[in-house]
Image (spheres, grey):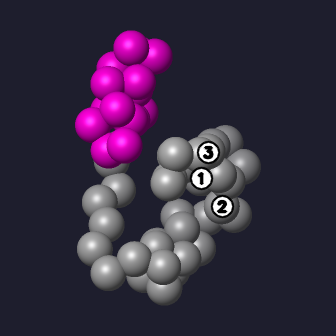
Amino acid sequence: MMPDHTVSVYVCGEWDLFRSYGSLVQWCDSEFIDYELVDITDTTKAERMAIMEGYV
């Protein structure tokens, strides 16, 4: 979550921005049957890249 309460997410191979965590969850519920939200707070770039590669 960003300081202005927006949420930056990596989904379907691209980065996107949502106004709030609630709007992200609402969008995911409408678009996907099953999904997992992974918190990447306090991770290094290498760790984030490894996480993203695991979901491609």
Separation (CA) of disc 1 from disc 3 = 10 Å
Describe the element under mark 3 as helix, strand or loop: strand
Q: Which residue is mark 3?
A: 15
What residue sits 28% from the left and 74% below the top?
A: 34
User: Is 47 positioned to the left or the right of 25 in the image?
Assistant: left
Name the foreground residue: 35 vs 8.
35
Question: Residue farthest to the bottom?
Answer: 30
Mark in the foreground, 3 or 2 = 3
Asked if labels 2 and 1 touch by Cβ distance under 8 angstroms, the answer is yes
| Residue 18 - label | 2
Q: CA distance from mark 1 to mark 2?
A: 5 Å
Q: Going by the image, does 8 lie left or right of 31?
A: right
Which amino acid, by three-letter code, is at mark 2?
Phe
Disc 1 target residue: 7
- Residue 3 appears in which quarter of the rendering? top right
* Type of amino acid under label 1: Val
Which stretch appears magenta?
40-56
Q: Is residue 47 left or right of residue 31?
A: left
Q: Residue at x 67, y 54 (%)?
A: 17
In the image, residue 22 sits, relative to residue 56, either above or below, namely below
